[in-house]
Amino acid sequence: MAAFSDRVRSGEWTGHSGRRIRNVVNIGIGGSDLGPAMAYEALRAFTDRSLAFRFVSNVDGADLHEAVRDLDPAETLFIVASKTFTTIETITNATSARSWLLDAFDDDEKAVAKHFVALSTNAEKVSGFGIDTANMFEFWDWVGGRYSYDSAIGLSLMIAIGPDRFREMLDGFRIVDDHFRTAPAEANVPLLMGLLGIWYGNFHDAQSHAVLPYSHYLSKFTAYLQQLDMESNGKSVDREGREVEWQTGPVVWGTPGTNGQHAYYQLIHQGTKLIPADFIGFAEPVGELSDGLKAQHDLLMANFFAQTQALAFGKTADEVRAEGVPEELVPHKTFRGNHPTTTVLATELTPSVLGQLIALYEHKVFVQGAVWNIDSFDQWGVELGKVLAKRVEPALTEGADVPGLDPSTAALVAAYRELKEVH
């Protein structure tokens, strides 16, 4: 990975026409997309700005179209990330990207080997696609997608930030791994975070958990955690196959501050649901910001501390009355407080700190799965929809009847066909 990344970054690796690669498009889905895309955004301040990076995951053709519409095929490298190289969304997008590339090279199949690399364990499928298996980066087949971006799946990130920064990120993972392995229970941060989540969910009926990073660069962090947490612990049977008798994984959601303050914080402060929240902030901004933009960081963090204070202590009716508020408005301006929050504070968002953050949540999820006695490392809930989609697709593309289709879905398929015909 490091050698290949250096070749792309230095310009030694060139496209089919001999021109330097300036655009990298990662094609994957789930862990093959969410991790690399999140980490690239998080560490954008450390990236090579002479290279453009795009991430394609949705089988909706608009995703690929918008990703490549302004790119030069002669300067574009596609990274196809699929462990089995059979993931339908990824291979569909990769095949369309291949056609886009070949259109620019008069269908010269030799171009594929210079503009496509694979992150996979299936050499036969990779070779059949036209990718040189010398440019196939493997990883262990037991690594789940949601735990994989620090493996070969992170190739796009390594090209973006360089091998040295990538190793710094791995060192961050290791710091928390060692902490989790050796720290006593009373000082073990992932253990405590996991147990707090169980306390809120199983003893106080919290149904969701908000993750609120006060950093623009962490704009995709919560989306990444959604897969990590909900795909791992969204289970209703235990490891022995028995129905569980307790609540398991929460709904994870959130966006960066201060945007969320003007959207859903109202519900957290004064709604009827208990919503534990993690606030993630940094003492220093990162990136080549002007002095004026750096100064805005204190305003950002003033909001950070104000929100956790307000959630903890609220505002009593007497305090509201003391401000001269009309009595009929007092109930509306009262905040009961006592909303649980966890504050994670670091000096700045570096590759090492990002690795530490991810490892922190990985181990938290593991702790909760162990306590609930569920398997945090399978995802059978993802499979059913895939199987049904294969059955339904012929009815949409060929007008074929689908035996055994339930009346509700059959009616929806018929409506879809009718709308297509009208158009």
Image (cartoon, rainbow, N blue to C red):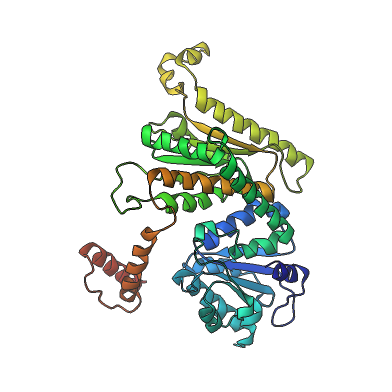
Name the residue nearer the viewer: 20 or 234: 234
Question: How many marks overall?
Answer: 0
Q: Quadrant of the N terminus?
A: bottom right
The answer to whether residue 205 is seen in the rendering is no
Q: Is residue 210 left or right of residue 156?
A: left
Q: Is residue 57 above or below residue 194?
A: below
Rendering quarter of residue 360 = top right
The answer to whether residue 254 is seen in the rendering is yes
Rendering quarter of residue 104 = bottom right
Q: Is residue 111 left or right of residue 84?
A: right
Q: Is residue 63 above or below residue 258?
A: below
Q: Is residue 144 left or right of residue 371?
A: right
Residue 341: x and y, percent? 51, 32
Q: Is residue 274 above or below residue 400?
A: above
Q: Is residue 245 left or right of residue 64?
A: left
Residue 177: x and y, percent? 59, 48
Q: Quadrant of the C terminus?
A: bottom left
Residue sitting at x 39%, y 33% = 273
Residue sitting at x 65%, y 49% = 172
Residue sitting at x 47%, y 44% = 367
Residue sitting at x 63%, y 86% = 110
Residue 311: x and y, percent? 51, 28
